[in-house]
Image (cartoon, grey):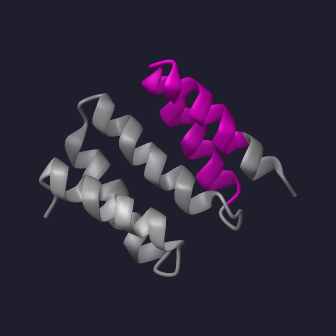
Amino acid sequence: DLAGNAQYWLGEALFARGQYRDAADAFLVGYTDYPKSAKAPDSLYKLGMSLKELGQIDAACATFSEIRNTFPNAPQTVLERTRGEMDKSGCS
């Protein structure tokens, strides 16, 4: 039951170390393997952040858009952070 949560925190640890490629991989696994996890919207958000750090702005914007489409009822903080990152990144 907590595998999705554990996968998210693995990604967070890698992101905090600046290992953005590995973090992106961990967040992607967290989202794709555990789509019903409470951390799935957070994993998708942090995947977008990792892609942004890797300079993949188009992919990051697509990922941020996916959050709004897939998780319209995600926690308000996730949706607000997503909107903020989309604005900063120049996403349309």
Q: Would you say the magenta stretch is mainly helix, strand or loop?
A: helix
Look at the image and tell me in which quarter the C terminus lies.
Answer: bottom left
- The magenta stretch spans residue 13: yes
> Which of the pair 20/62 is nearer the observer?
20
Residue drawn at the location 17% of the way across and 48% of the way down? 89
State the residue lying farthest toward the front: 77
Q: Position of residue 76 (x, y in %)?
A: 47, 73
Q: Where is residue 56 in the image (x, y as percent from the top left)?
A: 25, 36
> Which of the pair 27/87 is nearer the observer?
87
Q: Position of residue 48 (x, y in %)?
A: 38, 47
Region in magenta: 7-34
The image shows a total of numbered marks equal to: 0
- The magenta stretch spans residue 6: no
Residue drawn at the location 52% of the way across and 81% of the way down? 73
Residue drawn at the location 45% of the way across and 53% of the way down? 45
User: Is residue 56 left or right of 29 when viewed as pictured?
Assistant: left
Vertical comparison of 23 with 86: above or below: above
Residue drawn at the location 44% of the way across and 19% of the way down? 18
Q: Position of residue 72 (x, y in %)?
A: 46, 80
Quadrant of residue 21 within the rendered picture = top left
Look at the image and tell me in which quarter the N terminus lies.
Answer: bottom right
State the residue lying farthest toward the bottom: 73
User: Is residue 8 left or right of 80 when viewed as pictured?
Assistant: right
Vertical comparison of 65 with 58: above or below: below
